[in-house]
Image (cartoon, coloured by chain):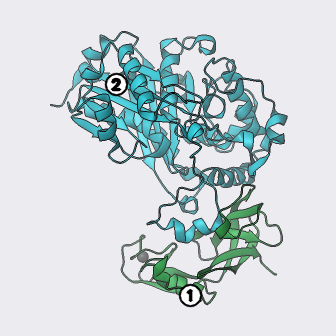
Chain colours: A cyan, B green
Amino acid sequence: MLITGPDREVFISGVAEAPLGEVRDHSELSMIALAAREALADAGLTLRDVDGLFVNYLGEEGTVQVGEYLGIQPSYSDSSDLGGAAFVAFLGHASAALQTGRCRVALIVYASRQRTRATRKLNHWNEKATSPQFEQPYGLPAPMGQFGLLAARHMYEYGTTPEQLASVAVTARQWAGLNPKAWKRDPLTIDDVLESRLICAPLHRLDCCLVTDGGGAIVLTIGDRARDSANTPIRVAGTGESARQWHIPQLPSLEASPGVAAARAALQMAEVGHADIDVFEPYDASTISVLLALEDVGFCARGDAGAFVQEGNLTATGSLPSITSGGGLSYCHPGALGILLVIEAVRQLRGQAGARQVPGATVGLVHGIGGLFSTAATAVLVRG
Amino acid sequence: MVESVFDWADPTTAHLWEAASKEQLVIQQCGACRQYQFYPRPFCLACDSDDIGWVAASGQGTVYSQTTVHLKAAPELGLVTPYVVAVVQLEEGPRLLTNLTGEACRIGSPVQVSWRSRPGQAPVPVFGLATP
Ligand SMILES: [Zn+2]
């Protein structure tokens, strides 16, 4: 059954964060259950309404394990592993599933306790892949080593400075100061970032995202069911995704970033331009990630993103309020941030973002990245 | 004593590691379209030809990007913190991940291959500033 016409529109009708920060009184699965129940209540639904399930990083046959735990029996399941970008990509996958009648209520969930478990691995190597032969001997810590290489190249090609990179972290911290749920809220200066210890030069400790526990849930519905939602439904107006390389030497150039194709597709589908975007939620795994996202999505010409951030454009009074939760740098980074980027965009577009609300925000753009700067997924979200 | 490369490599890369054990850097080149290829695949990704063979690389290249790592590496890698990981573009075109050794290099610096031995495995190619 292919659904057409106005009834074809897909909406995010419920969102919820899982417990965040340091979580000692829950498992990943119980965190997911709490977030799922809350997001469904937000949508005016219950677990018994869910027939589409989207998960990543939740073990072998993740949708089956999570489905059993939640007591649901999905007719549509998706665990495409696009790294941290998966949760943004799932907005597109879920839209297609809803529009072709494969499911009526789609649930996207994620949780991690990488902080409490202290199990974050620095290496992603797959024993059966080429990495052990051609990359592992050289000790590149994933993913900050890859981001260090990207940052160094960006500085070489465009004259980007360490201060410009640091200004991303300072901007994120300013936003985090307005978010009561943010992990780090104390003021941060450019010098603080530059004086923090080097991790993968030119990136310092404070150029890199947090390691926290956390997660969330997103509910998508279609047509009339969405319009019955308890809260303002947020329309999924455009989505795009792209996967490029696993090994960083195989990325031909900064201009060839997977984010370029993902963002172009999402903007074209949504039929909006850059000037229409009121709020931007880039995946800030590191400070260079944000500069690359600004250029990949096309908010800046190549090489201009450092100055753009330094001029204050991403702040609450800037031309493009961005990282409004405080992001992975200061709010929460539970191994994969994508789901929290979407939740924050929905809160902004509903006008529920409290002290950090961007006044009148009606169009948001979420840009997730995943793997070792391997994948990207973009979504354009519109109020009403 | 170097173990059989099949203990840790695979059939499509065995020739490369056999050459490496003699400190020779080899890459693939397509006989049909002349494209160079690294890392190895069973055919040419540019034109699908099976006519893919091994050639000696000159061992000369330039630094495409580099990062100095201040974290501790796995002990078996024999890397002393801080160490430099780089993407080097070979003169023939392909890029590879490597370490830079010796005198400090910059992005764009000309570099040439040398070899770091490993217990029980073939040496790996690393790079240092090219001697003029
Ligand atoms: Zn060929």
Left or right placement of residue B5 versus residue A39 in this view: right
The quadrant of the rendered image in which ligand 1 is seen is bottom left
| Residue A229 on image: x %, y % | 33, 12
Which chain is home to disc 1? B
Q: Amino acid at mark 2?
A: Leu
| Residue B51 on image: x %, y % | 39, 83
Q: Quadrant of residue A78?
A: top left
Q: Amino acid at mark 1?
A: Ala
Q: Which residue is mark 2?
A: A220
Q: Which residue is mark 1?
A: B19
Q: Residues within 10 Å of mark 2 (few under 14, many from 20)?
A: many
Marks 1 and 2 belong to one chain: no
Left or right placement of residue A101 versus residue A264 in this view: left
Up/down of B45 relative to A110, above or below: below
Q: Residue at x 79, y 37 (%)?
A: A193
| Residue A2 on image: x %, y % | 18, 31
Question: Which quarter of the rendering shows the N terminus of chain A?
Answer: top left
